Amino acid sequence: MTERVLVAMDDSEMAERALEYALEHYPSDEITVFHVVGEPSPWMGKAMSLAMEGDLEAAKENQAKAVLDRARGIAAEHDREIETDVGMGSPAKAIIKRSEEFDQVVIGTHGGSLVDRILVGNVAEKVFRNAPVPVTTVR
C-alpha cells in the first residue's frame, strides 16, 4: 500500500502527465512534487548561475517557481493539495536519493530537449533502474 508518492517534475508536458496520473491513481496518498535545479547542461549554464548566487536557497526557489506553481495549479484542478520540494544537482541522482523517503515514484518518460537527453542521459531510465522503491513511468 502506498502512502507517500514522489512525483519528479521538470517543465515538460510528460512531467505534467505524470502529476495528473499520480493525482488520479493515488487519491488518498500524500503527493510531493520534486523539482531539481542546477542540472548539468552542455555549457553548465544553470549550474553556473546558481553557483554565482549569494543566497543559494532563494536562487533554487526562484528557478523552481514556474514548475512548482504549475504543479500547484494542476493539483488545484483536481481539488488536491500537494507538497513541493526543490533539489539541486544531477536530476537522476537527486530523485533517487529523495525517493528513499517515499513508497512510490511517478516520473514522465522523458523531458527536456533532445540535446539535454543525449548529453545528460535519460533521467527516467536512471531512476527506474536505481530507485529503492517502485517507479511508475508515464507517457
Image (tube, helix red, strand yellow):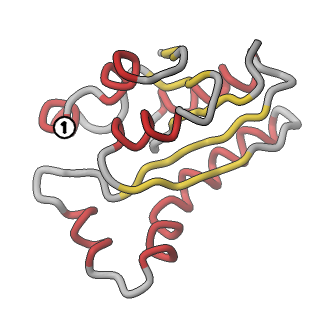
* Residue 52 can be seen in this image: yes
> In the image, is residue 107 above or below residue 51?
above
- In the drawing, does residue 123 fall left or right of residue 30? left
Q: Residue at x 82, y 43 (%)?
A: 81
Q: Residue at x 34, y 39 (%)?
A: 93
Q: Position of residue 44 (x, y in %)?
A: 16, 60
Q: Position of residue 42 (x, y in %)?
A: 11, 50
> In the image, is residue 35 above or below residue 136?
below
> In the image, is residue 5 above or below residue 26?
below
Q: Quadrant of residue 92?
A: top left
Report which residue position mark 1 lands on: 120
* Residue 138 can be seen in this image: no
- Callout 1, which amino acid? Val
**Crowding at label 1, few (<14), some or many (≥20) Cα neighbours within 10 Å?**
some
- In the drawing, does residue 1 fall left or right of residue 99? right
Query: SS at mark 1?
Result: helix
- In the drawing, does residue 66 fall left or right of residue 87? right
Q: How many marks?
A: 1
Q: Position of residue 26 (x, y in %)?
A: 77, 20
Q: Quadrant of residue 2?
A: top right
> In the image, is residue 83 above or below residue 132?
below
- In the drawing, does residue 93 fall left or right of residue 133? left
Q: Residue at x 53, y 19 (%)?
A: 133
Given residues 72 and 107, the one toward you in this image is 107
Given residues 106 and 11, the one toward you in this image is 106
Q: Position of residue 64 (x, y in %)?
A: 50, 59
